[in-house]
Image: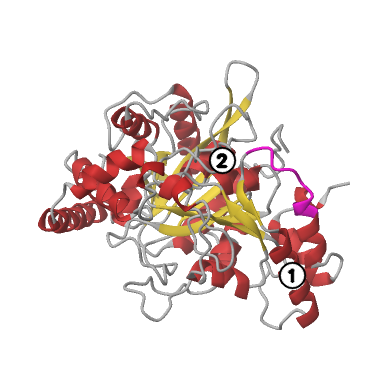
Amino acid sequence: MAELHDLSALEQGDLVRTGEVTPLELVDHYLARADHVGAFITRTPQPAREHARRLAARGRPGDAGPLWGVPTAVKDLNLTAGVRTTFGSAAYADFVPDVSDAVVLSLEAAGLPSLGKTNTPEFGSPCYTESDVAPPAVTPWDTRRTAGGSSGGAAAAVAAGLAPLAQGSDGGGSIRIPASCCGLVGLKPTRGRISAAPMYADPVGLATSGPLARTVGDAAALLDVLAGRRVGDPAWAPPPSGSFLAACARDPGRLRIARFITPVIIDIEVAPNSVEAWEHASRLLESLGHSVEDVPVPLPPEAVPVFETCWAVLTALSTAPEGKEHLLRPLTRWLSERGRAVSGPDFGLAIGAMRRLAADALAALAPYDAVLTPTLATLPPMVGGLRDDADPAADFEAQKAFTPWTSAWNVTGMPAVSLPLHWVDDGAGVELPVGVMLAARPAEEELLLALAAQVEAAAPWGDRRPPAW
């Protein structure tokens, strides 16, 4: 007999809707499960139970969504009133905000109790999750290997059955990277789809929140919860024609899909497993009736230093409280020094250059309905395999070599999803997921989800369970 955590988030929501399970029973079930993958920095049993009890006392509202009463988790970069929020940094180990951001408020309003704050590296900067305030987040498929980052804790929680689904955020691949490492669906929505109120901490427009889930439908349902603009947002995406969940049931039609595998941000050789996954996905898409065409890389080499300038400045904006600067990690200090060395006019010029590069890429890809690339260049490295405190510059280069495609869609603002379409033996008898990535035109998440759901139906992965389950 299946246990509650074996069910999809939507299936759990159905049980709540029919009264077979209460929100409190779901919360208690997940809180009883041990965190053996470094998923959480802070678990919040009392607030989660109190929220579940309030839901039961008020009763299910008439406009409740399909995830009402289903627990979730919040990345520790998101302000959560009354709950320790560390930003993955020892410099903020005791910080407790008095306000919640728009993402947390949306989850609470939709009736999703939070089980806690998920693990993230310092300020969400690296693509691995090895913070100084929690154990490393590891993939439950092989707990010697990283869960990716910076939403590694969120991905580890969902992949290990510690939460049905979770929110992550993505400024250069931080949802899609851990999704690939952990065998999940990870969706970076289009720019402006989800409000960043009240902090609006990214003036460049690279970062956005988004869902991590085991199925496309679960991810779409969580996007329905998170999406929407708030008064004061500097930009917003046009509303969808219906729910994102409903889009999963649509026939995407015959699509024209571009593909490329040449790394965007660094000249490296792509591992055979990633090439095989990309080729397998291409054949699957063609078998579904789509046209798949090779295209040149849509961003030129000069996009790399422009992105790095913006990334360094954004890191420099994440400052430590006075007197705690020494607690920052070497990588953070190195990137911040680079960022502080950029003048105001040079930063403005970099933002303008990035927007022009993005416009050129969007124009080049405009004839295509979707774009296919690998998600990652290699299998998930062992914990510590990317981190290099003695040489932060080498650390940064290793991250680029691991993730040479994901940041392209942060530059363009296009929605992109990593799907766990391929599985390989690592040579030591351990099965590991290898994600592939699909991107769509700006604001076309509905088409992207319809395509992703069609792919999932043709090559389902929902019954796979990692050893650490």
> Element at badge 2?
strand
Please name the residue that numbered disc 1 is placed on.
50
Please state which amino acid type lies under the numbered disc 1.
Glu
> Element at badge 1?
helix
Please name the residue that numbered disc 2 is placed on.
420
| Label 1 Cα crowd, 10 Å radius (few <14 / some 14-19 / many 20+) | few
Question: Where in the figure is residue 213, as x and y percent of width and height?
Answer: 60, 52
User: Against 195, is 406 above or below?
Assistant: above
Q: Nearer the viewer, residue 138 or 300?
A: 138
Looking at the image, can residue 370 be seen?
Answer: yes
- Which residue ends up furthest to the front in the rendered image? 323
1 or 2: mark nearer the eye: 1
**Which residues make up the magenta segment?**
29-37
1 or 2: tag closer to the N-terminus? 1
Question: Where in the figure is residue 319, as x and y percent of width and height?
Answer: 34, 54
Predominant SS of the magenta segment: loop
Left or right of 263? Residue 360 is left
Please state which amino acid type lies under the numbered disc 2.
Pro
Please tell me which residue is depicted at 26% across the width and 55% down the height of the picture.
362
The quadrant holding residue 57 is: bottom right
The quadrant holding residue 299 is: top left
Please tell me which residue is depicted at 34% across the width and 46% down the height of the picture.
407
User: Against 15, is 420 above or below?
Assistant: above
Left or right of 52? Residue 394 is left
Question: Magenta stretch containing residue 192, yes or no?
Answer: no
- Which residue ends up furthest to the left in the rendered image? 345
